[in-house]
Amino acid sequence: MINKDEFFRQVTIRICGSLQIETALCRAFEYLRGFFPLDEMYLDILDSCLGAIRRIANVKNGEALSNKPIIPLPEGLWAWIDMKPTAFIMEKSDPEVMAMSPLVNLDGNSDLVLPLRIEGNRIGHLIMRAYGDGRYDYSHTELLGSVAEPFAIALSNDLAHESVVKYRDLLLDDNRFLNRELLSQTGDEIIGGNSGLRNVMEMVGQVASLNNTVLLLGETGSGKELIANAIHSASPRKDGPFIKVNCGAIPESLIDSELFGHEKGAFTGAVTEKRGRFERAAGGTIFLDEIGELPLQAQVRFLRVLQNHEIERVGGTVSIPVDIRVIAATHRNLENMVTENRFREDLWFRLSVFPIIVPPLRHRREDVPALTRFFVENKSRELGIAMPPAIAPGALERLKNYRWPGNVRELENLVERELIRHRGGQLMFDTLLPDEKESSSTHIKAENEFQALTTLDEAIARQISAALKMSGGKIHGPGGAAELLGIKANTLRSRMDKLGIRYGRIKDKSL
């Protein structure tokens, strides 16, 4: 005669006596095999995220196994399993058991299943297996049912621990993500800041301390991300996150979720709520690279961020305020895209208040020697070269004369290839420059793509003229051109004098 109170106590001591679920299950296995036919024992859960049975712990002949299979389960079997209130035998005469038999390798085995619930909610199952058919009867189901509670507590604790570990890993991942984004790049560290990028850095100095949106324009590989880093690092938000998003690298179907986040259950696979990049950038800066690739639907949502400083997650109904600064960048001509109805005009007006044009490398050839030396030192360190090789003087002149259709990024890659090929002596760069004709055609293509942005002064003059037109010639005060451009009136007048732009109120010709 089994003393059920003692049986319950002994099982509880064993299954709840260790924080390691495999250890606890092994101890319970050794005790239970004195009362049941028993060769294997499992703790399984029905994982709705996977649509499958997921094994949490697996014991065979008293030893924990590392093998924890995931068994896909047809939808029709979920409800059938959930209907079982207490321990039951997998009767092979049941149609549902017959359907499940090949999935769980039931042929030639007997399974006794104990549903595990906490406060009425099913969390998983304990499965006892004996080799051979017909090994279990009603007395076994009744006895096993008496210890459902300690097994449920043990499984619940393990799942809770698993959840804590998961969220810990998510936080660590978030921390690593933000550490990668938090770059301490200052203007003084930008190569060319006192030469080819001098005008750009002047504009960075004007806008960095403010909170307005900035639009960076320039060819691919010209260094727009570096300028965005400089603006963030010189701003009052420098201690906040700096989140970078390449709008062209995110599939259109995922762009809303990535930028704005989603609520749990918003779509298939949204098993938890997710913060988007805008929320992650709270208190800091978000850099939206390749803004011209943003789909029209996302452009509408993005415009709301700029206008109201709030977002709404996919599947959500509550507006979430976001304290962020936006820096956008593109190599495309957004004005042409507006004409072609591929970019919203109202978004273009919001973005183009203060454009900064980053010139291509061929327009600042004086920066090539310094950039080359920097990349040689940096790439040597990455490649494990103890002593960076010297650069032949003739090589620098050859590099300066090249057109650089790929801009700074092309120069960086070229230096890395030369270092990989290097076999001693000075770096000559005599065999690695692409064919000049090919370079010329690529250069012409790049010029055509960015033809509206030929020089920095011309682009600034166009933008000032547009602001004066919008303000009716008014420079200072509310609605004036200086306010529209986000700069001081004296600074605007000085720049207009330098560019030869006349100023004065535009008279109404109808008068």
Image: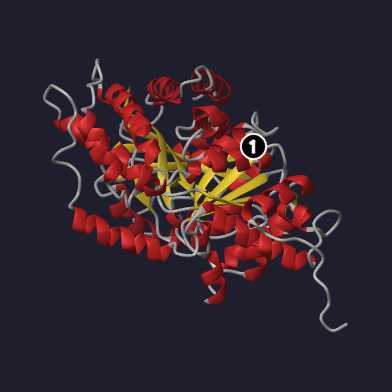
Q: How many marks?
A: 1
Residue indicated by mark 1: 205
Dot 1 alpha-carbon crowd within 10 angstroms: few under 14, some 14 to 19, many 20 or more: some
Tell me, yes or no, if residue 73 can be seen here.
yes
Residue 50 image position (x, y, % from top left): 44, 50
* Vertical placement of residue 359 versus 182, above or below: below
Residue 136 image position (x, y, % from top left): 37, 41
Q: Could you say which quadrant of the image residue 16 lies in?
A: top right
Residue 13 image position (x, y, % from top left): 53, 18
Q: Residue visible at 43% across and 54% down?
A: 219
Residue 313 image position (x, y, % from top left): 65, 55
Q: Residue visible at 29% across and 59% down?
A: 442
Q: Could you say which quadrant of the image residue 506 lies in?
A: bottom right
Q: Residue furthest bottom?
A: 510
Q: Which of the image's four quarters has the C terminus?
A: bottom right
Closer-to-camera residue (43/507) = 507
Q: Residue furthest left?
A: 423
Q: Residue visible at 21% across and 29% down?
A: 419
* Vertical placement of residue 279 versus 232, above or below: below
Closer-to-camera residue (225/478) = 478
Tell me, yes or no, if residue 186 can be seen here.
no
> Which element type, helix, strand or loop, lies under badge 1?
helix
Three-letter amino acid code at the position of disc 1: Gly
* Vertical placement of residue 384 versus 255, above or below: above
Is 394 left, or right, of 115 in this rendering? left
Q: How is the image coloured?
A: secondary structure
Closer-to-camera residue (329/374) = 374
Q: Could you say which quadrant of the image residue 440 lies in?
A: bottom left
* Vertical placement of residue 288 versus 511, above or below: above
Closer-to-camera residue (478/167) = 478
